[in-house]
């Protein structure tokens, strides 16, 4: 049973090293030099091209290299097989660190002070105090719940929005379409941590921005296709939003000349909020390979109809 690594835009070396350390006998094939396609029964993938996976007639499981699976499910010819994703505490920790950084940067005007210092400026901006700032997290899953708890521990008021009914312990929870507008109406800092699905694509748009509290700040760490970029710029330039911190974009890398690069109220980072670390995650990927080999159900399987 051959194990294929098919990572578009990501170097495979770290995975090869870690997987071989776990199982030196593993029959590892690196795409595109995989030999006979019918040998491949397990695939670790990132951004496979549409139609790429259907060539492997004996494939039994498709494992996402990351937490998201939109990069797999967008393939209209995707074989009808179990798709798994990464669920890892160190990824949740890294994501929380990024979100805490972005929220504190906004509340304490860090980027403004960096700019001021370059101009030897001495102007005080009154801090937005945690106890008076409500952070609203869209998506209360593995990553959103972790970040919500960390922000609450710092003294922020925190709420979350999720798809299915049911409270998340310790966090004010809003659910479904009916819960969206009331959730937004109380939000000073909005964090998007939703999976990209047909329901959530373009969700960060003019209507949604208009419902946030005046001066609200937007943090998008989910996917670029959640955000209608022109609506964000219009909401900031129109004065309703104070700015945004963006880690993900419709086109990555963000193209040269894109308006976000030079916008004084937009912070851009290169999809680094929470990067999968092969040295930690290879063990769970290998465990799924072992399970598939043994005819058992793989861990962290996503629901293809739901899209996450
Ligand atoms: P997860 O555990 O599957 O959680 C997803 C959350 O979103 C759940 O709470 C779910 O609601 C909610 N949700 C889904 N569809 C919804 C809808 N239509 N309306 C309202 N809520 C909805 O996912 P995760 O592990 O936290 O990861 C979230 C996303 O983060 C990933 O899909 C990926 O795109 C992104 N990500 C980005 C980076 C980065 O470096 N920037 C790194 C890792 C992941 P229920 O609780 O009701 O199911
Ligand atoms: C990164 O974006 C991931 O989905 O893990």
Image (cartoon, grey):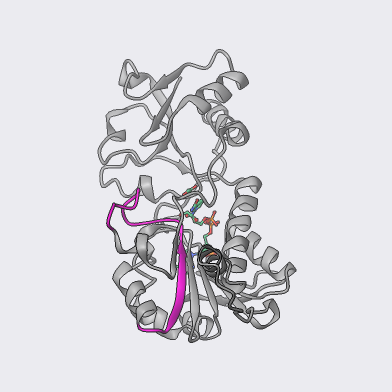
Q: Quadrant for residue 287, please give it.
A: top right
In the displayed structure image, the side of residue 135 where residue 3 appears, left or right: left
Q: Residue at x 39, y 22 (%)?
A: 30
Does 255 appear in magenta?
Answer: yes
Who is closer to the viewer here, 248 or 262? 262
- Looking at the image, residue 220 lies above or below residue 301: below
Q: Quadrant for residue 154, please give it.
A: bottom right
Instruction: Residue 160: tell me if it is visible.
Output: no
x then y, percent, for residue 139: 53, 65
Q: Residue at x 50, y 79 (%)?
A: 216
Q: Residue at x 49, y 44 (%)?
A: 66
- Looking at the image, residue 172 lies above or below residue 19: below
Does 292 appear in magenta?
Answer: no
Instruction: Residue 264: tell me if it is visible.
Output: yes
Q: Residue at x 57, y 68 (%)?
A: 113
- Looking at the image, residue 40 lies above or below residue 93: above
Q: Which residues are magenta?
A: 238-257
Dominant secondary structure (helix, strand or loop) of the stretch shown in magenta? loop
Please state the total of marks drawn on the protein image: 0
Who is closer to the viewer here, 102 or 66? 102
Q: Quadrant for residue 51, please give it.
A: top left
């Amino acid at each position: 049973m051959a194990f294929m690594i098919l990572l578009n835009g990501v170097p495979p070396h770290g995975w090869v090293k870690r997987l071989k350390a776990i199982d030196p006998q593993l029959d590892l094939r690196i795409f595109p030099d995989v030999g006979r396609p019918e040998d491949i029964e397990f695939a670790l993938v990132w951004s496979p091209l549409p139609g790429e996976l259907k060539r492997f007639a004996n494939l039994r499981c498709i494992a996402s290299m990351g937490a998201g699976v939109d990069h797999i499910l967008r393939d209209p010819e995707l074989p009808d097989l179990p798709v798994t994703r990464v669920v890892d505490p160190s990824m949740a920790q890294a994501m929380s660190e990024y979100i805490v950084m972005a929220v504190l940067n906004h509340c304490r005007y860090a980027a403004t002070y960096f700019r001021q210092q370059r101009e030897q400026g001495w102007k005080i901006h009154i801090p937005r105090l945690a106890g008076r700032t409500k952070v609203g997290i869209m998506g209360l899953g593995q990553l959103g719940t972790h970040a919500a708890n960390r922000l609450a521990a710092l003294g922020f008021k925190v709420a979350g929005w999720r798809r299915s009914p049911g409270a998340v312990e310790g966090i004010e929870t809003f659910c479904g379409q009916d819960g969206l507008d009331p959730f937004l109406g109380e939000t000073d800092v909005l964090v998007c941590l939703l999976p990209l699905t047909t329901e959530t694509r373009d969700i960060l748009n003019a209507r949604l921005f208009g419902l946030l509290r005046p001066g609200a700040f937007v943090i998008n760490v989910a996917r670029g296709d959640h955000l209608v970029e022109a609506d964000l710029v219009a909401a900031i330039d129109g004065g309703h939003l104070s700015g945004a911190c963006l880690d993900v974009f419709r086109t990555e890398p963000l193209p040269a000349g894109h308006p976000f690069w030079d916008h004084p109220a937009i912070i851009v980072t290169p999809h680094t909020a929470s990067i999968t670390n092969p040295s930690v995650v290879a063990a769970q990927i290998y465990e799924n390979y072992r399970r598939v080999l043994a005819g058992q159900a793989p861990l962290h399987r996503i629901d293809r109809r739901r899209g996450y």
